[in-house]
Image (cartoon, coloured by chain):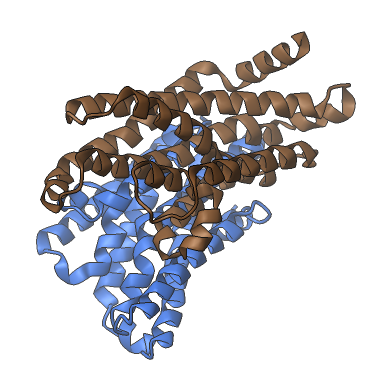
Chain colours: A brown, B blue
Amino acid sequence: MKIRGTMFAEEHKKVGWPKAAWAMLLFSVMGNGMAFVFFLRYRDDFVSQGTPMFDGYLLFYSYFLFIAAVLFSAFMGYYIFSKEYQSGMWGVLLTKNISKRRIVGAKHVLFLLYFEGYLLLSMILFTLAAWYFQLDIPLADWVSLYGLIAFVFIAVAYGQLLFHIYIRNGMIASALSVLWIFLFLSRGYLPNSVAMYLPLFNFESVLSRMLGYTGYPGPIVLHVMLSSVFYMLVIFISLKHDYYGYE
Amino acid sequence: MGILSEIRKWKGTGVWITLACLALVPVAGQGYLGIMAKVSPDKVYITALSLFFRMFFLIAIGVVVSLSFFNETRKGGRLNFILHGISESNLLVHKWWAFHLALFIYVIVAFGIAGGVILFVGGNPLNVYASLGVPFVFILMSTSIVINLQYLMTLAFRGYEILALFVVLLISAGNLFISSTVFWIYVPWSYPFRLLYFDSLTVSHLWTIVGLFVLSTMLVSGVIVFKRRRAFF
């Protein structure tokens, strides 16, 4: 237990908490700020169409939260995984008696910790915006929304993490985050039966079901399970991946 | 040393595959949508290239410029200049020309892929592109503005080139939405996209683009001249 704690502390030290905390703040403010500005601009359109204000805000929020989450994952993925290729850290596994599982496990814990922090911060900003726009959110809804988002949204982060595990050049892995954004933007052109099984869109399916829309088929439990299977798969891949070698 | 040597340095870094991905995915994807929507042959290139110029092209510029400086720092390329007594401004000038050469060709390639989409809808790309002489020159000019800005940004974040890439990632995500609003003229990164709709631009917009092109080029030249006075930074 002590070794695991030490490993985590070492990984944390390598990334540097001020940098990660600032990034967390910047990306969540950016995502929420964009949602806030756009909702302010298009609020009247929702009123004229008869769409509930809460649903309208959630639409913008999920949209920008996704983009900011992918970019934040790229940032953290670069500093947690990709930088190790540059410094040749993985070579240590060949020369020292250290378990790869423990190192990668510590990296995953760190990555998840900061990503959950990002989601929590985003939810706090979401609540502040909801208070500003006088949107009525019952506490039970807030908790269930955060609970589901915190769990299902990890699939988005782990989608980006796949690039950082497989591509040795961190800059290129970060730049390829744009492909996830492209997939997200063109999801409307995908058949529902395909979009439903893509782990990247599970959070949207969950949100739609929570709001009572039937655009995406399948119960919430199915989407939660799909997300879980996806990130268990990524963790498994990351543990089995051959990291040795320089960028 | 030399412009082509700069481009040769990118071999084996994954830049070419990334550039191919960043051009093929959006142009082919959007082109397919244009074909499905039965857009007329003389306008389908706009549909095919819109997402590319809004987002992917900016990231391609970011990757090329930042990665080039990053590799120079990481692989100790700068040490050669101490050992061989060559000024750093030479490196900077060659890099600047190499970026322009590679990315201008990249724009032409993107238009070429969009030409394939025009063929699909039954048009002739040569006929369509024949009337785009002036807009194309302005697109290259706006490309140069974005390259210059990325160049200056990467120099400012010397040693932390990844931050320059993240800045352009954030800007391109914002540009997805800003480029469709009236505020696009304040964001130079949206110029290549807006120039696809050349008929909607006013003379003052074009003068702004020319002015920014001159200003950014002068700024880059100023930085390079400043470096000439110093042996190494």
Q: Quadrant of residue B112?
A: bottom left
> Going by the image, does A125 lie left or right of A118?
left
> Going by the image, does B81 lie left or right of B231?
right
Position of the C terminus of chain A, as image quadrant, is top right
B38 and A198: which one is in front? A198
The residue that appears at 43% across and 55% down in the rendered structure is A216
On screen, A239 above or below B191? above
Whether residue B90 is visible here, answered yes or no, is no
B147 and B43: which one is in front? B43
On screen, B196 above or below B186? below
The residue that appears at 74% across and 39% down in the rendered structure is A236
Q: Quadrant of residue A82?
A: top right
Residue A206 in percent (x, y) is at 44, 43
On screen, B64 above or below B40? above
Residue B15 in percent (x, y) is at 59, 55
The residue that appears at 46% across and 49% down in the rendered structure is B93
Residue B159 in percent (x, y) is at 53, 31
The residue that appears at 59% across and 40% down in the rendered structure is A158
> Going by the image, does A30 lie left or right of B18?
left
Position of the N terminus of chain A, as image quadrant, is top right
Residue B21 in percent (x, y) is at 54, 61
